[in-house]
Amino acid sequence: MPPVLRLLPLLLLAACTGSGASGPTGQPAGAPESARTSALATAASAIQRDAPVANLDVYLVGFHPMKDDPNHQVEAHHFCRVVNEELMQCALFDGNTRAANLTGVEYIISERLFGTLPREERRSWHPHNAEILSGQLVAPGLPTAAEHALMASKMNSYGKTWHTWDASANALPLGPPHLAWSFNREGEARPGMVEARDRRMGIDTAARRAARQDLVPLARPQAGVDALKGRFGRPTQPIPGVVEAR
């Protein structure tokens, strides 16, 4: 493994503390936390184990449309654990502050593992090349070389994502979970959504897109690229290197 990838857990943990703050998108229902509950939580944090969540040290921010309703789109803050070279598991939030709401889960697997899945199961896994090559998927605060290495390592990967709560629309996580997808053409993201994230967090998506053009030759055709094609109600354009597998 390249040295920069061996350092990623420490570098990404630093990125979590160095990136721009992004608060939650909504206020959950319920009475304010009482002094008793706060004291209990403080005591619990001092004596109880938190090993599983302590390993969520890779921080990514991207966007997801829902597969059953592509115009339902959310900004997703991923806090992930690198399980091994071919699997990551992520808790999704609507921000990166202590008040952020837990909104879903994503599993990320390699192209090789995707190829072992049954044909029907593959329909639940979205491709990642467009998210990377468009510059929309970012690791905020990470040094440029380390972020580039991380994105290169995730080329041709796939994600299975379930969103359980859109806190901007509902004060509680209502209804069934939604299978989320990826944007695979320029113009699919809701106008202004990426730009709003960039202003709030000090991110330059266009610069990242330009810097990742050397990754285009690594891109192989992926299943699911055309799954939502033509369903956004506005003109879209292909992203170089992002091609549907035939």
Image (cartoon, rainbow, N blue to C red):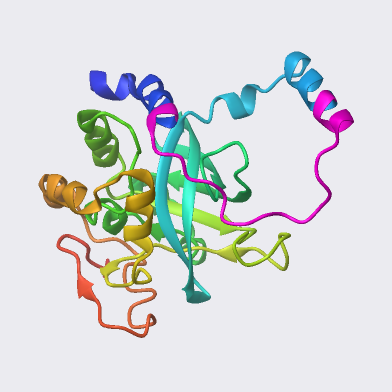
Residue 201 vertical position relative to residue 131 in the rendered view, above or below: above
Instruction: Give the quarter of the image for residue 15.
Output: top left
Instruction: Give the quarter of the image for residue 234.
Output: bottom left
- In what quadrant of the picture does the N terminus appear? top left
Residue 105 vertical position relative to residue 146 in the rendered view, above or below: below
Position of residue 46 measured from the top left corner of the image (x, y, whole percent): 74, 15
Position of residue 69 measured from the top left corner of the image (x, y, whole percent): 51, 76
Q: Which residues are magenta?
A: 17-39
Q: Would residue 201 appear left or right of 90 to someone viewing this image? A: left
Q: Is residue 1 visible?
A: no
Position of residue 33 measured from the top left corner of the image (x, y, whole percent): 81, 39
- The residue positioned farthest toward the bottom in the image shown: 233
Secondary structure mainly formed by the magenta segment: loop
Residue drawn 43% across and 25% down?
A: 13
Residue drawn 47% across and 45% down?
A: 22
Instruction: Give the quarter of the image for residue 240.
Output: bottom left
Q: Is residue 148 visible?
A: yes
Nearer to me, 3 or 62 = 62
Q: Would residue 119 appear left or right of 151 to someone viewing this image? A: right
